[in-house]
Image: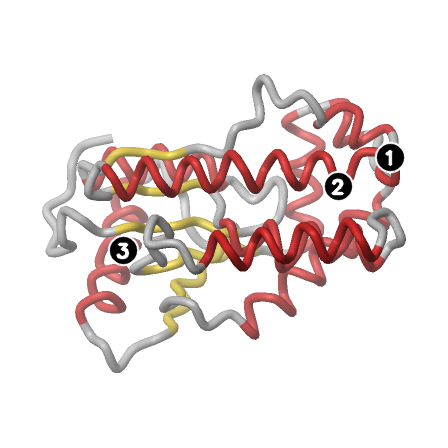
Amino acid sequence: MEPINHRLPASALITLAGTVGVGKSTLTKALSEALGFKSAFEKVDGNPYLEDYYSDFKMWSFHLQMYFLAERYKQQKRMYEEGLGYVQDRSIYEDSGIFARLQYDQGNMTDRDFNTYSSLFEAMVMSPYFPRPDVLIYIDGSFESIMNRINNRGREMEINTPVTFWEDLYNRYRNWIAEFSESPVLHLDIDNYDCYDPSSLKEIVSALEDIHLNKDINYIKL
């Protein structure tokens, strides 16, 4: 993707959020190239718990969430030490506010484990190595469109997961973003943009400039 001239500071942190299958990784790559920023991806390859988790939520949910929390914190620390200038695939807020909470609500995480997880998350958020996003890009779409993307990418462990799990996750994301207040939000609909189209990316970059440079704007939906 060709670079796009923009007015965002070189130290900005743009973080992408959204349920599984909405295209966070694809947009992270395209947007980092367009902005001339570095990219930070969620660590999926080499995750020692992921496949076990999808086969037995109750047994492995605490282990998986602790692994993701540790990896996310290390990523935050590295970006901070490098002076930022990053597009980040998924926020640490989703780990706590959606995924850990989902497992707890469904009885897959005990009170003791959830309290331990939550205490560690709060300690991490208070750390100076924990920069908040300058803008959080929330990617959304119809449930049908998202399920089509999950099925099309063909990850067996996702395809074999009951649809009710994805429905619950989808609804939790919509409730979570309505309460999110850690940073301004740019809301994208997957059916209304194409990250391979330069004109779509220019529109996204323009909206990022508007929401970052105008402190009176906290939310934009494209």
Q: Residue at x 36, y 35 (%)?
A: 196
Using a 10 Å C-alpha cutoff, classify the residue at mark 1 as few (fewer than 14 neighbours), some (14 to 19) or many (20 or more). few
Closer to us: mark 1 or mark 3? 1
- Residue 217: image quadrant is bottom left
Q: Residue at x 46, y 35 (%)?
A: 25
Q: Position of residue 161 (x, y in %)?
A: 83, 36
Q: Are marks 2 and 1 in contact (CB under 8 Å)?
A: no
- Residue at the disc numbered 3: 203
Query: What's the residue type where badge 1 is placed?
Result: Met
Q: Nearer the viewer, residue 8 or 83?
A: 83
- Residue 40: image quadrant is top left
Query: What's the residue type where badge 3 is placed?
Result: Glu
Tell me the quadrant of the picture where the C terminus can be found: bottom left
Is 209 left, or right, of 26 in this rendering?
left
Check disc 2 and report its element: helix, strand or loop: helix
Tell me the quadrant of the picture where the N terminus can be found: top left
- Tag 2 or tag 3, which sits nearer the N-term? 2
Q: Position of residue 67 (x, y in %)?
A: 62, 34
Real-space Cα separation, disc 2 to disc 1, in angstroms: 8 Å
Could you say which disc has been placed on residue 62 in the image? Answer: 2
Q: Residue at x 32, y 39 (%)?
A: 197
Q: Residue at x 55, y 51 (%)?
A: 18
Query: What's the residue type where badge 2 is placed?
Result: Phe
Using a 10 Å C-alpha cutoff, classify the residue at mark 2 as few (fewer than 14 neighbours), some (14 to 19) or many (20 or more). many
- Residue 206: image quadrant is bottom left
Check disc 1 and report its element: helix, strand or loop: helix
Closer to us: mark 3 or mark 2? 2
- Tag 3 or tag 1, which sits nearer the N-term? 1
Could you say which disc has been placed on residue 59 in the image? Answer: 1
Q: Are marks 3 and 2 in contact (CB under 8 Å)?
A: no
Q: Position of residue 12 (x, y in %)?
A: 22, 51
